[in-house]
Amino acid sequence: MSETELLTGQLLFEFRTIKAMVNIYCKAHHPMKPSHDVCEQCREFLSYANTRLDRCPYGQDKPTCNKCPVHCYKPHMKQKAREIMIYAEYKNVTSPSNYGH
Ligand SMILES: [Zn+2]
């Protein structure tokens, strides 16, 4: 994804985390697309998240978005972010690949 070129360091790490979560979420909730890609709606969310990270006032010192005191997402995007994070966390704790940590 060329848009990730905007981000470096902590911001890039955050974006990759969000992207991984969106992938898990999209596969489970929007299974109409080939498995290698996320749907239009989720791609739009990712691109929005990318823009917010790029403009984050904390820059490299930012906390992770779900702990950040600056709620920069628009309400409906924030709602989607919460859904995605809750689902991804649920998948993480129940995934057999994470046993042993
Ligand atoms: Zn999707």
Image (cartoon, rainbow, N blue to C red):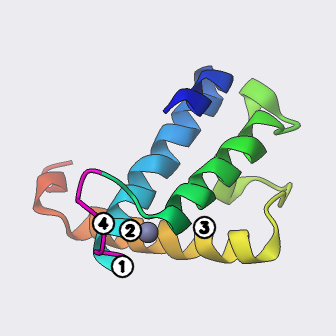
- On residue 91, the disc is none
Q: Badge 1, how many Cα within 10 Å: few under 14, some, many 20+?
A: few
Q: Amino acid at mark 3?
A: Ala
Q: Nearer the viewer, residue 89 or 17?
A: 17
Q: Is mark 2 within 8 Å of ligand 1?
A: yes
Q: Which residue is mark 1?
A: 29
> Does 22 sit left or right of 48 as displayed?
left
Q: Name the amino acid, label 1.
A: His
Position of residue 95 relative to residue 79, above or below, is: above
Residue type, numbered disc 4? Lys
Q: Secondary structure at mark 2?
A: helix
Q: Position of residue 82 (x, y in %)?
A: 59, 72
Do tag 4 and tag 1 residues touch (Cβ < 8 Å)?
A: no
Question: In the rendered structure, are the residues bearing label 1 and label 2 in contact, judged by CB atoms less than 8 Å apart?
Answer: yes
Which residue is under mark 2?
25
The magenta segment: 30-36
Question: For residue 94, what is the image quadrant?
Answer: bottom left
- Residue 78: image location, x then y, percent: 71, 70
Figure quadrant, ligand 1: bottom left
Residue drawn where x is 86% and y is 55% of the image: 70
Above or below — where is 30 with respect to 89? below
Residue 81 shows which numbered tag?
3
